[in-house]
Image (cartoon, grey):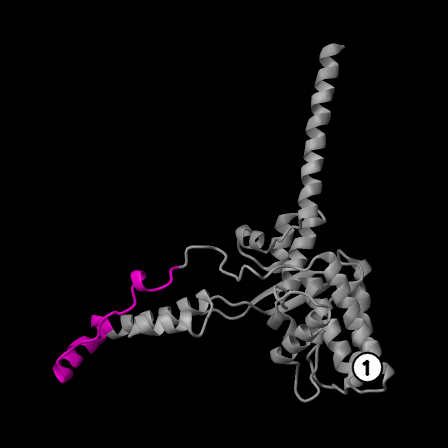
Amino acid sequence: MVDEWLGDLRSLRDLKRSTIRSYSEAVRAFCHFATDPLYEWASTCEERFGSHPVQVVHEWNTAVHVQDNEADAKKRAFTKAELHAFFAHCDDEVARIRAFGRKGWLPAFRDATLFKTAYAFGTRRNETRMLDAADFGRNPHGAEYGEFGLCRVRFGKAKKGSPPKRRSVLTVWDGTPDVLDEWFAEVRPLFGAEGNPAAWPSERGLRIGCQRLDSRFIAYRQALCLDQGLDFHSFRRSYVTHLIEDGWDPRFVQEQVGHDHASTTSIYTCVSSDFRTRTLRRHLDGTVAAALESQNRRQS
């Protein structure tokens, strides 16, 4: 019944292509195990039940991975104006809640700082959530950033069968140290998190959960009337996009976000039309200038 099952996942449950393929690969792997002569399951089943297991997952009845990028086409990066508005709204919410004398301003401040950190270092949601206070440190080649010159990501996206991938991300935005210094020096101690290593402690547990982050993000997105193509991962898309737009070396950006291949980084590069227009104009102007110079030389 694998065909009916996969059809149900696609048409009724509306699961992502990558999720459906992952499910089908799990079934394929089990069938491979059950039909492998090494384990003698086939002969045992034939003896006991008069039948034997067969492989039911094939290329012709399952989703095949044929593209590098299978993300939802609606997902995108923030524009710089949208990002500025989002962070301004984060700060306004903290001020609004605090003005009413409510305790909720501390979690709001924490979440605002966490969002800014995700953009500042281009980290994924779980990478950001799992940061500890000790994961921030000095960069000897960027002394101007003080105690927040780099971020050690210890829970990066793992490959199959491997532990979480680690990397160090260098600070690139001038305002990042001030944001983190205010949080760790002035606000985080108010959580009463003494002995808690987590950078973003929860009110009831060790650290904030993914569901809380998602609900806060969605609430802010809706308040600003931004479209659903923006999600937490958009901070990472924006980080890559804005660095490329600002002229940073693509290889450096690739290392910062921990991609093994440049093609993966290029998928994240949602370079704005304004950037492409400026780039095109610069090259066209250079071509025209070179042609005029060549004509002047011939005339002289």
Could you tell whether 217 is left or right of 2 in the image? right
Residue toward you, 52 or 12: 12
Question: Where is the C terminus found, in terms of image quarters?
Answer: top right
Residue 159 % position (x, y): 48, 66
Give amino acid for label 1: Ile
Residue at (70, 47) in percent of width and height? 274
Residue at (25, 69) in percent of width and height? 55
Could you tell whether 262 is left or right of 129 in the image? left
- Label 1, secondary structure: give it: helix
- Which residue range is magenta in the image? 35-64
Q: Residue furthest top?
A: 300
Please say whether residue 167 is one of the residues in the magenta stretch.
no
For residue 110, which quarter of the picture?
bottom right
Could you tell whether 46 is left or right of 77 in the image? left
> What residue does disc 1 label?
97
Residue 112 % position (x, y): 75, 73
